[in-house]
Amino acid sequence: MAPSIFSDEPQHGNTTKPYSHDPSASTPASSQQNGNTPHDQNGSSCVVDKKKGRHAGAGHKSILQSDALYQYVLETSVYPRENPYQRELREITEKHPWNLMTTPPDEGQFLMLLMKLINAKNTMELGVYTGYSLLSTALALPDDGKIIAMDINRENYELGAPVIEKAGLSHKVDFREGLILPQLDEMLLEERNLGFFDFIFVDADKDNYVKYHERLIKLVKVGGVIGYDNTLWNGSLVAPEDAPYPKYICHYRPFVLELNRVLAGDKRIEISQVPIGDGLTLCRRIK
Ligand SMILES: C[S@@+](CC[C@H](N)C(=O)[O-])C[C@H]1O[C@@H](n2cnc3c(N)ncnc32)[C@H](O)[C@@H]1O
């Protein structure tokens, strides 16, 4: 079965913080670096579920009414049209211990359609993992399309890179290993990068999204789109006080709340919260 945020049990063994670039640390590395500790704006709390391996309280079903309905979407609209290379990479990723991080196939399909709807050519992806969203985007871009893809972890990307190669798409991908923030700062120093990108997909460390936004708004073109992934954060944003969540969900929850607040108030963009996957907020730059 495809790794899906809609299932009640996680498909990976690490329930602490799969979204960080350093899975061995007890506190997310980026938070340690930047000292980010935003307060929860709605004043509610997030209860850490101490039962190992349990994904209790996750609000997946609030997006679609049931797992059965999600399965219906996959079986009728997604899998029959999934590219064989996407399928191969999905199956490779399913065997990886952090497979909870992968972009679900319905969202991959949505990204492909979006690329075509906006005629995207120059794009960027922050947070690659094994490359399912990267492959999906690359499939949809024209032959001279480009994706600058950043991730601190090359090892995981190397699981997907041979599939991207086999699909004949490597020439579209410029993988840049390293931390995202300094790479964005470096890009901002070059005039030619300003307002250059048609689309930017952000699927990395949630505690830095607001910082990324301030930089990305200058890199995306007017009329271009930034997509922030996981903006519904497993339903935890509106969780009842006693709903237990994995530790990494509780840790990043205030940062996702802060991002949603910032995006809702940002007059430089038009936004839409798309309830696909774990929530994808599309932001179109208008000035
Ligand atoms: C949710 S996964 C990306 C999933 C991917 N889009 C897909 O479709 O499979 C998040 C990725 O962000 C990377 N990451 C997290 N924080 C980072 C940082 N500060 N700089 C660079 N990469 C980071 C992690 O190594 C991880 O591979």
Image: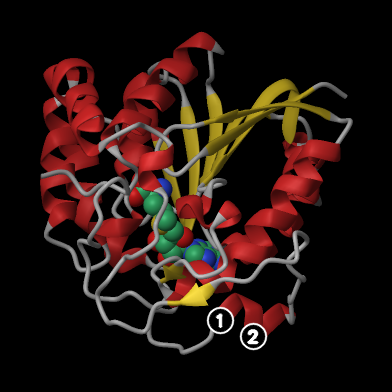
Can I make out residue 45 in this image? yes
Amino acid type, label 1: Ala
The disc at residue 32 is: 2
Query: Going by the image, does 243 lie left or right of 100?
Result: right
**Image coords of residue 38 (percent x, y):** 76, 70
Quarter of the image with the N terminus is top left
Q: Residues within 10 Å of mark 1 (few under 14, many from 20)?
A: some
Q: In whole angstroms, how far apart are the C-alphas of marks 2 and 1?
A: 5 Å
Local secondary structure at mark 1: helix
Can I make out residue 21 in this image? no
**Image coords of residue 39 (percent x, y):** 77, 71
**Image coords of residue 82 (percent x, y):** 18, 24
Which sits in the foreground, 275 or 213? 275
Q: Residue at x 11, y 60 (%)?
A: 95
Q: Residue furthest bottom?
A: 26
Q: Residue at x 40, y 23 (%)?
A: 110
State the image quarter where residue 171 is shown: top left
Q: Is mark 1 within 8 Å of ligand 1?
A: yes
Q: Are marks 2 and 1 in contact (CB under 8 Å)?
A: yes
The disc at residue 5 is: none
Q: Quadrant of ligand 1?
A: bottom left
Query: Going by the image, does 194 lie left or right of 224?
Result: right
Examine the rendered structure and indicate whether residue 199 appears above or below residue 176: above
- Which residue has dot 1 on it? 29
Query: Going by the image, does 208 lie left or right of 80?
Result: right
**Image coords of residue 252 (percent x, y):** 58, 67
Local secondary structure at mark 2: helix
Q: Residue at x 64, y 78 (%)?
A: 31
Which sits in the foreground, 23 or 135? 23
